[in-house]
Amino acid sequence: MTDYSSFACEETKVHEELLEKVKRDLPDEDKLYDLAELFKVFGDSTRIRILFVLFEAEVCVCDLASALCMTQSAISHQLKILKANKLVKSRREGKAMFYSLADDHVRTIIEQGMEHVEE
Amino acid sequence: MTDYSSFACEETKVHEELLEKVKRDLPDEDKLYDLAELFKVFGDSTRIRILFVLFEAEVCVCDLASALCMTQSAISHQLKILKANKLVKSRREGKAMFYSLADDHVRTIIEQGMEHVEE
DNA sequence: TAAACAAATGAACAATTGTTCATATGTTTA
DNA sequence: TAAACATATGAACAATTGTTCATTTGTTTA
């Protein structure tokens, strides 16, 4: 990593170098936006709690609602967001709809987050 | 992982078993809240962009502002949030304040997120 | 010490978001 | 087929959040 720290803010030449490097390496605006949107999904404690329950088992909507002491509607709205972002998948079984984790990124991301807050 | 999926929603006995397990294993309400708060920090594209710039180098506030084409005030407000959540650290050098990444969880979390959105 | 510069902060406003309530859709069973 | 059940959805409301503008704090230097 280049060290720019010894230059004051008037030293425009070196900073232009940095700014060009940043503009070259920064991912597309679209991708950064998608990334922020993804983390926004994790940024709600109801959705985090849903994911934690799904770490244990495949669970239907009504059980999620009673496990988390929330209305069926609230849970259903949040599941829709989780599904739209491919964090969970669903499967119908008769009247019930069962939800489970979509893949293992979810686990890793939450584990890393947990490590951070537990420090 | 126990399979509860073959039971309908009326089968209250097995579900109670699941609900008890969930209540036992679910982290404290406080911890889940903190975790959601952490992800909320990642859930804004300005802050994501700041972090990406800091992947490259230690950078002062005015350079962050010009790199991201935003006002100094907006960047400063966001840096305060990043710092409060221990994602960045700062160091004064004369008039300038230099910011850098606080630890490597930040990188891991963002990398995992990137993998997910790129799928 | 006064002027200039870099960063931080508080108040205000617009935009976004999570929950509730009412209702619709889809599936089973009597 | 009608009733019952599980889930999904749309509208509305309160709460939260990001940016701007004006101002303050902290540091250097003329």
Image: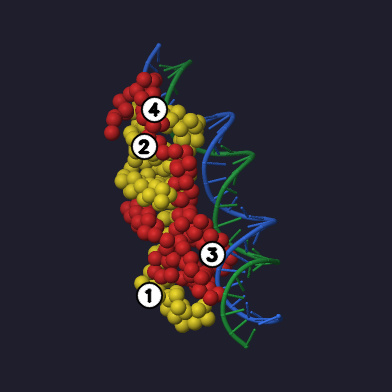
Chain colours: A yellow, B red, C blue, D green
Residues A2 and B65: in front is: A2
Q: What's the CA distance linking mark 3 and mark 4?
A: 45 Å
Look at the picture and state if A39 lies above or below A65: below
Q: Evaluate whether residue A90 shows in this view.
A: no
Which residue is at the front of the view, D6 or C27? D6
Alpha carbon of mark 3 to alpha carbon of mark 1: how far? 22 Å
Instruction: Name the residue that disc number 2 marks.
Output: A54
Q: Residue A2 carries which label?
A: 1
- Residue bearing mark 3: B75
Q: Residue A71 carries which label?
A: none
Q: Position of residue C9 (x, y in %)?
A: 62, 60
Q: Nearer the viewer, mark 4 or mark 2?
A: 4
What type is the residue that disc 4 sits on? Glu
Lower position in the chain sequence, tag 2 or tag 1 = 1
Label 3 sits on a secondary structure element that is helix
Residue D8 location in percent, x, y?
Answer: 45, 35
Assess disc 1: are there few (<14), some (14-19) or many (≥20) residues with their C-alpha within 10 Å of its C-alpha: few
Mark 2 or 1: in front is 1
